[in-house]
Amino acid sequence: MRETEYQWEYQSLPFDEKMKDALQQQHHAAQLLALAGHHLIPQKPDDSNTNMEYFPNKKMLIGNPLPNGLKLALKLTDLELFILDDLDSPIQKITLKGKTKKMVFNELKINLRNHSVDVADFTESLHYEIPSHTLNDGALFSAEHKYLAENAIYRSNAKLVLSNIVSKIENAEAVKIWPHHFDTGSFVSFAHNKKGELSQTIGLGLAIPDSMIAEPYYYLSYWSAGELTGADNLPQPAKGKWMMPDWTGGVLPISDINSECSEREQEKAVSSFYDSGIEIITKLLKQ
């Protein structure tokens, strides 16, 4: 699927408990796409059969093609699940709101079977765990549209900025969403040793709240098999901050971006974080 050009959307709502709950419901809903990738698509070494891509113009997460060419898609702003044909046109819609996870899964399984998908091995089991939510105890999907929509804006803006950044970096992977941590990110194979083994990497993306930061945040991280001199005394990026020595990377929280007064300034804040941070990390890795 190809999309027409899209622009940065203004981020305005504070990330409070209602925003967090809407994000968690999106995270749990996205596992339906991951389940299909895990059980219905041949396994890949990097587990990329479970990942998905966000399409801002459609406000949809779209998973990888099933063996018969169908795909699953989740509209983040409305918590609606779609089965798409091989031309990415919707042929089935399942509304999540007012239903439990179990109800939605059963409905999805029936509809996939009706569209000639072999669901004999399709179960609700995954090979990782995500943060618990009342949805696991039978609560209904119920997040308000405005909070779902604001979280979707984060995804659109991340796709815009990150895609622009990685287009300028050699050996950078396409921007994807990984269902386990629900980050929108990319991975750069920066260097290899004489044996051809990966020896240095760079990671960048938008992460959801975790034990390090209690709100969504952009991150820029690195890894090196060899010891690096000066890693604990790097110059600060233009925006955000380094988290060394506790973590090998830097962060730019959503609240810092939202404090900017215009779309242009918000986008500039994220771009500045990456442009300056990548330059600093590149010099560190190349020493």
Image (cartoon, helix red, strand yellow):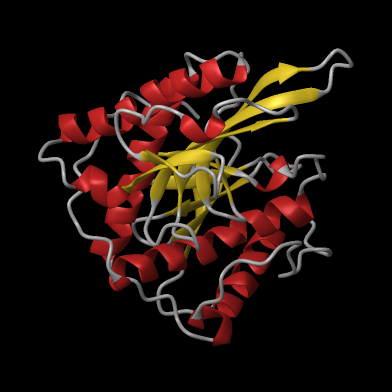
The reply, left or right, for residue 135 in relation to residue 199 is left
Q: Nearer the viewer, residue 142 or 180?
A: 180
Residue reaching furthest to the left: 261
Please, is residue 246 above or below residue 45 in the view?
A: below
Q: Position of residue 37 (x, y in %)?
A: 70, 50
Q: Quadrant of residue 241?
A: top left
Q: Quadrant of residue 242?
A: top left
Residue visible at 48% across and 58% down in the picture: 212
Please, is residue 138 above or below residue 10 in the view?
A: below
Is residue 115 in view from this perspective? Answer: no
Residue visible at 45% across and 68% down in the picture: 25
Is residue 193 in view from this perspective? Answer: yes
Q: Nearer the viewer, residue 230 or 27?
A: 230
Please, is residue 216 above or below residue 159 in the view?
A: below
Residue visible at 26% across and 32% down in the picture: 269
Q: Position of residue 161 (x, y in %)?
A: 37, 29
